[in-house]
Amino acid sequence: MIIELFSNLVRADLFPFLTAFAVTAVLGPIFIPWLHKLKFGQEIREEGPKWHQKKSGTPTMGGIMFIIGIGIAIIALCVLRAVHGSFNAETDGKLLLLYIIALGFGVVGFVDDYIKVVKKRNLGLKPMQKLILQLVMTIVYVVAAYIIEGSLSTSIFIPFTSFTITLPVWLYVPFIMFVMLGTVNAVNLTDGLDGLASTVTFVEALYFMIAGFFMTVIDGIHISAMAAAVAGGMLGFLIYNRHPAKVFMGDTGSLFLGGAVAIMAIDTHTEIFLIIAGFVYFMETLSVIMQTTYFKYTRKKYGEGRRIFKMTPIHHHFEMCKWSERKIVAVFSLATLVLCVIAILSNTRLF
């Protein structure tokens, strides 16, 4: 029974996975030299680890590669379904919406990268500008989802239980805005080492591919297809992004991925499960919050700021503890894999 179900899962999502992988992999030898030619090199901030300075000039904005790969995979899948007469306006509409919203976040990241690289302003968009643009994309998603479905499902599944919380719309909308913005910026913070965000998100995509496939009660087919495309895109990108990286995804890629992960969690009503499955993202953000809060508190109380970690986000702390980039990526990815399995087992609706 289980073998048959997983066999069906592979058959259902193999096409978008392979298509996204192939397109992203093929774009590398074309796109990376083009970025070099345009001198779209990453500027390394001085407050980061000193040994990262040798990465200065590595092409950034490489996220465009897998954004194109994932987009082609999704469009090709919809066309293939239409040709075979299995196109479903609602399901495939949700799939296209998911990609478009993630693409919108990617565009915000592209603008940020463009300002950094071309305009030579290392901080890119101002925090408030970035926040407003992300809020706009979140609102667009809520409105579009309401139009497609005719209503807004406000249910939230609780891990390790069969309980479901149904929030009033006026409370649910701010909640998913918090989830969206938090996830997008958490993935962005995770993108600080060669292959880290790519590998962690690859594992995360496999989790959503399985969860989306089995959660037929909430029509998760579009989630499974999107997750498969993301997984394929990440695998293709890792050919060039693994240590030593030939290209970085930039905010273009990390904001796109953050948007995709957030919407997949929202559409499967598993927002709270992200604390488990996306624990690495969560800790990257929490480490920054803890460090900043403690530094300000100790500076006010003792006259000098003190730190909990050697450097944040937390992957830099482990770097300062003399962990290699490969070791950090391997440990963080393995932790994500274990936690994703726990998240799947904690979702009673999958069994």
Image (spheres, rainbow, N blue to C red):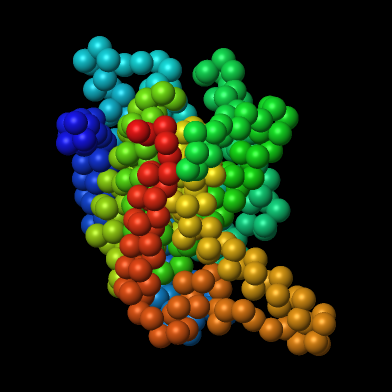
**Image vertical order of residue 109 relative to residue 219, above or below:** below
Q: Name the residue rendered at 28%, 28% in the picture.
A: 77
Q: Residue 8 occupies which quadrant of the picture?
A: top left
Q: Nearer the viewer, residue 188 or 123?
A: 188
Q: Name the residue rendered at 43%, 44% in the picture.
A: 346
**Image vertical order of residue 58 relative to residue 324, above or below:** above
Give the side of residue 147 with respect to residue 10, left or right.
right
Q: Name the residue rendered at 67%, 58% in the picture.
A: 126
Give the side of residue 265 with respect to residue 74, left or right.
right
Q: Residue 150 occupies which quadrant of the picture?
A: top right
Give the side of residue 8 with respect to residue 213, left or right.
left
* Residue 85 on image: x %, y %: 25, 12
Give the side of residue 347 with respect to residue 68, left or right.
right
**Image vertical order of residue 14 relative to residue 315, above or below:** above
Q: Name the residue rendered at 65%, 39% in the picture.
A: 175
Q: Nearer the viewer, residue 173 or 155?
A: 155
Q: Residue 308 occupies which quadrant of the picture?
A: bottom right
Q: Is residue 264 visible?
A: yes
* Residue 122 on image: x %, y %: 58, 68
Q: For the N terminus, which image quadrant?
A: top left
Q: Nearer the viewer, residue 157 or 253?
A: 157
Q: For the C terminus, which image quadrant?
A: top left
